[in-house]
Amino acid sequence: MILVPGAVTLPELEAVWRGADATLDPAARGAIETAAARVAAVVAAGAPVYGINTGFGKLASKRIAAEDTALLQRNLILSHCAGVGEATPATVVRLMMALKLVSLGRGASGVRWELVALLQGMLDAGVVPVVPVQGSVGASGDLAPLAHMAAVMIGAGEAEVGGRRLPGAAALAAVGLAPIELAAKEGLALINGTQFSTAWALAGLFGAWRAAQAALLVSCLTTDAIMGSTAPLRPEIHALRGHRGQIEAAAAMRAVMAGSAIRDSHREGDTRVQDPYCIRCQAQVTGAAMDLLRQAAATLVIEANAATDNPLVLEDAIVSGGNFHAEPVAFAADVIALAVAETGAIAQRRVALMVDPTLSHDLPPFLATDPGLNSGFMIAEVTSAALMSENKHLATPCSTDSTPTSANQEDHVSMAAHGARRLTPMVRNLERIIGIEALCAAKGVEVRAPLSTSVPLAAALARLRQDVAPLAEDRYLAPDLEAAAALVRDGALVAASGAAFPDLG
């Protein structure tokens, strides 16, 4: 897969995150080398330019001698390797490296082609720098995380390669690569940028979208389990409101439920006038969440293609700006968090509906066989409530929580890094909520036999039963919950249904 700077797409980025190989478009070399030549000319002229022959941040007024240029860049990397916490997952680090290649490929960073080739070589050979998850406030770039990546390029730090964790120089040597001595501005170009925050935000986005698709599918299974109405899915209702996500969600649900004998069995003579909101408003809520995810996606694909280091090498000057400020990423991450929390909130209410015999239209209490002797999904529903509540707290905005750093030189920051990083545990919580709903809905649909659900829903139920047997009597339940969540995470239930669901584009 060729990554064209300025034109990289969401499907390409998701493919990289899921493990696909990717190469920077070789056509980017001309612009990269032109910018590097401009930096070399500035160094030769001796005029003071930030980050090339000056100190950094609050120390920008300090001039650096020409003979110390390489040491300046090396010291920058080593001093900024101040991250803490567990290592970032390899999938996110690889995406971060690809994003840095794309940014450098815009030809505004002033780095040599040799540096780009080394980063590309590391990506190709599976050299994954060990990048601690904590340490960035999302302004002046993701300085600490990107420094840990850059450290391996100069033979310092640590990296994983071939299943081993090695010192940076040894990791490079293991795949036939060698460390590079940084030239003027190159260290700054590597660590200024939003690629760490953006990679985490994209990972959250991709997981959230897959979970939202599963939420639509499983909510249909729940609707049949409680013998709910499909009348609220009529296209005229959604066209009158006009939101794309809502319209598409309702259309997908109508298609998935078409032909259900369970639904047809109670079209006449049902004394219930309306279903609870968690059934009746599924398209409105999950569709709105999908609209939010698409808004965030539009921001993140722009950011993925951006030149975000500082200073930037323009045609007529090298200019200090602020593209490293990750406020767009922070806002996008907060929006994704809201969508994830609300998708889980309404899914959890559907779980609660199914286990409550006063609301579930004659399903057994807690979907238990021989209730009393067995508790069924009683505590699984409690678990779903705990996960839902945790996500509500995690959805609190991070972008509003600025604090001054670096002796007040960096006096407003985005907090994009942990704002984006918190999305992954939120998505994991959502996957488990939807997995619990799938288990409950499957049991509810099975209780309705000999009435059958639709063909797509029956196929999804059959896929679930390949990994999780029906709950005939109480058993150790935790592995079942994780297995169901994995089917949501992997997209297996959606794929098994054979139905079409909205895409992120």
Image (cartoon, grey):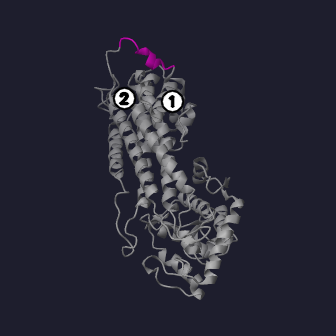
Q: Quarter of the image holding residue 440?
A: top left
Q: Foreground residue, 472 or 14?
A: 14
**Mark 1 is on which residue type?**
Ala
Q: Quarter of the image holding residue 32?
A: bottom right
Residue 96: give x, y in percent of width and height: 55, 60
Kindly identify which residue carries mark 1.
Answer: 252
For label 1, the SS is helix
Chain-order first, disc 1 or disc 2: 1
Vertical side of 260 occupied by 479: above or below = below
Is residue 371 highlighted in magenta? no
Q: Which residues are magenta?
A: 259-269
Q: Foreground residue, 390 or 198?
A: 198
Kindly identify which residue carries mark 2.
Answer: 369
Q: Quarter of the image holding residue 271?
A: top left
Vertical side of 28 occupied by 500: above or below = above
Q: Is residue 123 visible?
A: yes
Residue 134: give x, y in percent of width and height: 43, 65
Q: Is residue 40 left or right of residue 345?
A: right
